[in-house]
Image (cartoon, rainbow, N blue to C red):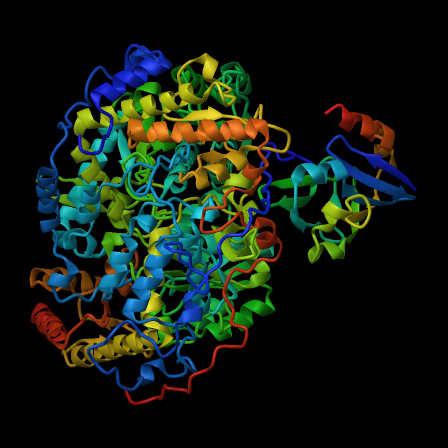
Amino acid sequence: MNALNPSGWRPHKGESGGEAPQTVSGDRGLMLEEALVFEIGGMDKCGVDFDVEPGAVSGALAGHVRAAPLALAGLTEPETVRHYTRLSRQNYAIDLGPFPLGSCTMKHNPRLNEKIARLPGFADIHPLQPQSTVQGAYATIHELAHWLTALTAMHSVAMTPKAGAHGELCGLLCIRAALEAAGDAREVVLVPESAHGTNPATAAFAGYRVENIPATAAGRVDLAALTARLGAGGPEKCDVAAVMITNPNTCGLFEPEMKAIADAVHAAGGFVYCDGANFNAIVGKVRPGDLGIDAMHINLHKTFSTPHGGGGPGSGPVVLSAALAPFAPLPFVERQADGTMRLVEEEEAAIDHPGSFGRMAAFHGQMGMFTRALTYILSHGADGLRQVAEDAVLNANYVLRSLEDVLDAPFADAGPCMHEALFSDTGMAEGFSTLDIAKGLIDEGFHPMTVYFPLVVHGAMLVEPTETESKAGLDRFIAAMRSLAGRARAGDPALKAAPVLAPRRRLDETLAARKPVLTWRAAPAPPMEPVLSEIGGS
Amino acid sequence: MRYLPLTADDRAAMLGVIGADHVDDLFVDVPAEARLDGPVHGLALHASEMAVERHMSALAQQNLSAGSAPFFIGAGAYRHHIPASVDHLIQRGEFLTAYTPYQPEIAQGTLQVLFEFQTQVARLLGTDVANASMYDGSTACWEAIAMAGRVTKRGRAVLSGGVHPHYVATARTMARFTGDTLETLAPVLEATPDDTATIAAIDDATSCVVVQYPDILGRIPDIAAICAAAQAKGALVIAVVTEPVALGLLRSPGELGADIVVGEGQSIGVGLNFGGPYLGLFGCREKFVRQMPGRLCGQTVDADGKRGFVLTLSTREQHIRREKATSNICTNSGLCALAFSIHMTLLGGSGLDRLARINHARARAMAKRLAQIPGVSVLNDSYFNELTLVLPTDARHAVRDLADAGVLGGVSLGRLYPDNPELAPGLLLTATETVTDADIEALATALETALAGVPA
Amino acid sequence: MTRYFTKDHEWVEVEGTSGTVGITDFAQGQLGDITFVDLPAVGEGVTAGEAASVVDSVKAASDVYSPVSGTVSEANPALETAPELVNTDPESGGWLFKLTLSDAAQLDALMDKAAYDQYVAGL
């Protein structure tokens, strides 16, 4: 078998934690239970009033009409508001406290962003409106694009990718299109073992074979091994299309040999893709274009503060070098000589931009995220963005140095970290692991850090405080972590029961995966309404 | 700076704990030549809320918003009224500022919403299961084609002429790199979709047939007939729904036999947003669940035996399976899924039925009025809330003239199909519940003016 | 009947030209709760040292390499509804698939029980 669970992640169902006080309702004070909407709603409930009577269905729908309305329970407005508000209270969020997920950059989401994104001139415009009616939208995209290229010292930017992984795909497709245009079909993409899972998945999705690049003991890309893999034969003898590197990397470290890596890859005729997930560490301080990269996606939902929303939407514009820019996807916006904005779609591209690899999604990308990100960039300004990177790195190093005596920190001796501090489960008592620290943090009122990632460190704990945390907030987090580290080293059995203070105890993930229940089904079939539709004249 | 809590004293004290003299000592691994000496060139210094709002509002005001004009544009994105409570609830910080629910004990809110969302979507599409969302309809469509390839171990997909051209273009981009073969049929300006041509394109090497319902011209294809033909050849049927409100009234594609149903969920709860963020819907038969892309939420119990929800079947996904994952998707459209689910809860099955009937009635009223214009005819035998009008001229000109008259009067087929001059007279028009009789009259009058002088 | 082991923690039990393949107790212990087993189809050819099956736990998916080359003759039907057999009875009822060996000489490269136990003790 391959890879016998290298990360060491094995869910533990948790021990009994004693009896919680029982109530008749099932609710306990402000800890509120909430049934499924299908259990509390009904077909006779509706939270929307309509102005007009629809009348009969016309012949234009003959033979296509449902036998009965869709069997889905509805709720009135007060019930709806209560249902979702009660559910919301079962979530942890950055608005409630530190959310130190490494590699995820959970920073404050400014509310001005939300206000701006909801202006009707942005929120209530259609992507296919005539160009004369959406000049401001094109100008907004163009302005954000300008600042993204300025902050990265890159030639241009593809704005359409819908999220980071979609941006990776965009970058690799540009690379593939560029190589194919040069008649140079290559088959391999090199990815470090410490990379985000999206990197190898994207390379495979784009039709490439993935090979690993080894890391050095210091947690960096092994330049010698990389150079050996690229070979000394120059572009003619090399089958490597691209190297995907995260910088700062997923161990929270800067790749100091980035320029040498890029030079080696370029000498072999390949391209350098940089995973920009960790751009927050260097924004305003370091420009990736100065390090020789060819493409990098920027997660607007990380560095530029657009909300994660419980799993998206993201937005992943990709900055491109001059060599890759001609292959960028459609559509895109251009400023014309007279100052007006023009949208380049298939028809225009056939004349002006024949190299484009085409469309990778309908429409223009995540406009709702563009307005938020631009608002954020203008709010912080050049000085503020620089301070963002400095505070993010300062906060991470403060956590690293405040915990390295109680938790194993594999790369701490080598020097400072960047925006995130990495620890391992080495030194914990037999039977105790990273999972127990994470669940213990929940009882302490914190969201856990990223666990069991990167895969190169056993029982990894990756802490990214971001610039959003105050010193007092960090001190509270550090105190909780020191306590939990001590309990894990001592083998405190109570820790195995954590969390006991959350809306739920540890959940049985094995049961969920062995016998998947992915939709709600009523015990008896939902009652069918009488047939309402009738065929009338059109 | 209003978003940065550290004070100068804090920073000094923290550097002391770290043992560094200056914050730049923490950037020691960055080669000196790659470090910026000062602020990024050209970008102004930090700005007040008021100043930023002024700048952004000026940009917004250069756009003609849909609500401020008679509005008839659809073609894959639809303007519906969104109840006020939807936008209020999605701005609850516990939803808005949470991450993907990787720690289920403190993410039951998001997880239960996803479970409810999956149930609502599966019922709407008529599939056994649905995932927790994709980026949008176009990317969901390609993911379905890729999935059909994995299931059937075949690499030739047939895309009917009724599939949205942007969806076709997205699939074409991906297929170019994966080596899949796409058989893409061209739409024809006929009153009914050419299901016969679609069926004729299916052969023994076909992995899937992709058919849009209603199609890009607003017509309703015979999914059941296509399913029967595909099944006979061992191919899967992928139904694409760009206007989910239609499924309040139309029989679901799953009920008609489709194996995979994907859609653009924007219509319900999300808003136009100039094309994004939107919401990809993805449902399929239960037996294909381990080949599905994207996140799945499943029901389970906690250590006390209480019902709870977790992300499950994660071994399909990139963070575990890496290069062997079913997709590279990570962040999806969680908040849009929440908006969809809230709106769907407010409607319920009976409200969705009502909404769909009103949409269809508005489209009928529009069709009736426009058909009175000399030289203009309605193409469709069947339609829901969107239909194709055939003009005596290139519809691109008409759209421009309408815009000049302050009417956002649909999408010309010439814009969607610049290579196909036979489609140029086609004007795609949508009427949702937001369209008033006065809007229809304004459209008709402006169109009459635009066509005056054009020989019928 | 003789049982052989690989360094990748698979076992194969051979009788004549017929072999039964599974993963070892040590392997299942490292993986944790098995949630799903993706088995090869009957009639599929498998190659020694190449992935023939995938064993999923909640947080990991591991390829199972076939210890020897051959043609799959049967996949364990019990695993479809009870993947936990790989945890509870890995070296008997939790077998994965049977195959007809195409090159019995490949067995010479594998370990016997004593050698495997010694190998695991050294990990």
C87 left or right of A311 in image: right
Q: At which x and y percent is residue A403?
A: 44, 22
Res C9 quadrant in image: top right
B124 left or right of B49 in image: right
- Depth check: give the residue in front, B182 or B118: B118
| Figure check: B341 above or below C5 | below
* Residue drawn at the location 75% of the way across and 56% of the way down: C78
Q: At which x and y percent is residue B12?
A: 26, 16
- Which image quadrant: the C terminus of chain B? bottom left
| Figure check: B363 above or below C107 | below
Q: At which x and y percent is residue A140?
A: 17, 42
* Residue drawn at the location 24% of the way across and 71% of the way down: B432
* Residue drawn at the location 57% of the way across and 54% of the way down: A512
Res A271 quadrant in image: top left
B149 left or right of A287 in image: right
| Figure check: A209 above or below B234 | above
